[in-house]
Amino acid sequence: MTTTEHTPAATALPSLYDARERFLTGRPLPDGVPEEVAAAWRRARFFGVPHDLKAPAARPVRPVESALLDAARPVLDRIVPALGAGRSLLMLTDERLRVLWTAGSVPGLETCPVLSEQEVGNNSAALALRTRRRAEMHGPEHYLDRWQDVSAVTVPLLDPESAQVLGTVTVASRLSTARTPHPQAALAEAAAAAVETELRTRAGRAERVLLDAYLRATGPDGARRADLAVVALDGRNRLVSDAAQRLLTPEVLEALERTAVSVRRGGGAGGAEDTGAAGCTARLGDGAGEAEGTEPGGRTARLGDGTAAARATEPGGRAARLGDGAAAAGATEPGERTRRLEDGVSGAGATEGAGCTARITPARLDDGTVLGIVAVLEPLGDPVPSAPAAPRPPVTLTGSSVPWRHAVARGVELARSPEPLLLTGERGTGKSALARELLGQGPVRVADAARDTGLDGALAAWPADRPLLLRHAERLEQPGVAALNSLLDTHPDTRVLVTYTPGAQVGPCLQRLLDKLSARSVTLPPLRERAEDIRELLPVLAPRTLPGQPPLTWTLDALRALELHPWPGNVTELAHVVRALAEQRRMSGPVRRAELPDAVREGPAARPLSPMEHAERAAILEALRRHGGNKARAAAALGIGRATLYRKLRGYRD
């Protein structure tokens, strides 16, 4: 389960009330205010959250379909009687902290539709989502006036397979005199454990049903047909026969994914642009004998009856948009067993140029719930030339994690005005790539301080009406800083984007410039803090395959190793690994863990860590992130010697 994230102010609430009032009125904070609390207040003010907020400015759109809510609702309904009348409020949120479900009540406490820091300031749900462990928050530790008499405890909900955060469970009550631990912390822990157990049970049952439906479609036991092109999909998992692999184009796969999502939502044609987490793609061959498959949770099972080695997941989580003329794949209507996807058929059209049709049959659980589809593909007699593939999304905009989407949204918002914009982050996080996206398609003057520390050549030939992208600002010397300051003073309306990698010691002139630009800055999160985006990045980073060649796919074990690696070089390092594997490997099938580089294959830790070690490791990684990877500064901030920091880092890997 999770360990507690104790707020450091839990034993000094009376003095915090005064400190918060001083903060809100612009007076200096007294000594003794924990840095974590003060930083949370500053973030709320930076996000523009009013302390007297009555309700969030915008109500978020709840997801049309939520597997988390479906699994959690019956579990939480059984817990509601334990809340007590008018004493506690129980809330369920998704990974974006949108409130999906509430029960119970607390006098004077109204629920918010969203609990993200950008909307309502710091709270236990946002803290638990960020730290991935139980978090508590009491009274004045909150930023909002409305929560000054509230204590809350939140436990994150983790995916049983990928360990990614799916959402949170929160119990809120009137301010607890006992403060930490929250008197209903055990209830929150029990609720989260029960929801995770239900998720694990449902995932296993659904995958077994989908596999059974796939095997039935390929023929009866002992007479499986290798020439049948069969695909089974449920929006997360895919089972694809060898014959189907030869017919599947990106357009056909997109149409089938849309059909699977549409069927699960209860009918209607197309319209779904997102397949969800396209997690487990198994490619079942037609070889003789038994072969390996993948069960929920990544365990290996034996699949008999002529299936070849089960090949795991194509990690692309986002569906590409269909090309012009591609009709959306329709759902099977109630009472209808199969339906053909053909050109020109309203509501069930195959993608233009797909070269095949599909007979769709829904896959159902015992209670009749549709969980996905099984499609039997048949080639058209006179196929038309395939349409060009839809363009892939830019690498810099790929990712659906909360830290990444927030950084991109912040950059887009600030880039709308002509004032200078500072993009900061570790090397390889995508600062320059994001800057190019923000500047648009027009001509851009690029100056690189790593090559021209004084900016003599770059600014001399720079036309004032063209946007300027300055890379590696940390390399600027004093003449370059003076030149940039002069440019900003003489051309205040010129769009200037500056990228900066913290870590190296900077001089006073450059520091003043950075302080000046920091009011309009965006910090890009390192890849280790958004590991859930790796599955979306992999297909975008991989080189385009030749016609007729399958895309690069990955076993579940390899994916877990990629997600656990700390990636000091961030997206740039991941791109080098993916391209090297794509260009150098001679094996067929998915990339296995054994093919990964040694540092990635071995993983960050060879032994389970104790709760104390987890807390220490999280504190060290956070300090390293704040100081741009500079171990000396991180050690000083933590109050330990540099040798001690190195020893602890080595210990976590032993």
Image: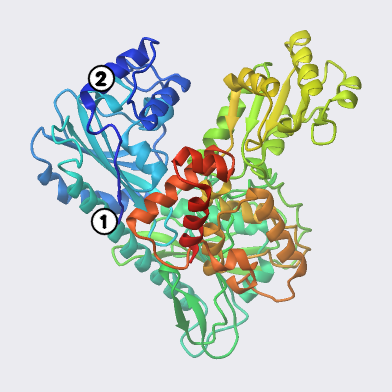
Q: Note whether residue 572 is visible.
A: yes
Tell me: 169 left or right of 464.
Answer: left
* Image-quadrant location for residue 285: bottom right
Point out the tag, 1 or 2, that comes first from the N-terminus: 2
Q: Is residue 112 left or right of residue 411?
A: left
Near-viewer residue (202 or 146): 146
Which one is in front in this view, the residue at disc 1 or the one at disc 2?
2
Who is closer to the viewer here, 369 or 546?
Answer: 546
* Labelled disc at residue 165: none
Look at the numbered disc 2 and give the secondary structure of its residue. Answer: helix
At x 27%, y 23%, the residue is 16
Q: Could you tell me how far apart the alpha carbons at marks 1 and 2 are, in whole angstroms?
A: 34 Å
The answer to which image quadrant residue 396 occupies is top right
**Dot 1, how many residues are within 10 Å of its Cα: few (below 14), some (14-19), or many (20+)?**
some
Q: Secondary structure at mark 1?
A: helix
Q: Residues within 10 Å of mark 2 (few under 14, many from 20)?
A: some
Q: How did the renderer colour the structure?
A: rainbow
The residue that mark 2 highlights is 17
Amino acid type, label 2: Tyr
Q: Is residue 412 above or below residue 192?
A: above
Q: List x then y, in percent, for residue 370.
A: 38, 59
Q: Give the image location of residue 123, x and y in percent.
A: 33, 32
Q: Position of residue 387 (x, y in %)?
A: 75, 53
- In the rendered image, the quadrant that contains the N terminus is bottom left
> In the image, what residue occupies the spot 25% across and 40% down?
153
Residue 330 visible to the viewer: no
Q: Residue at x 47, y 47 (%)?
A: 620
Query: Could you tell me which residue is drawn at 38 percent across and 11 percent down?
Result: 27
Picture disc at residue 193: 1
At label 1, the amino acid type is Ala
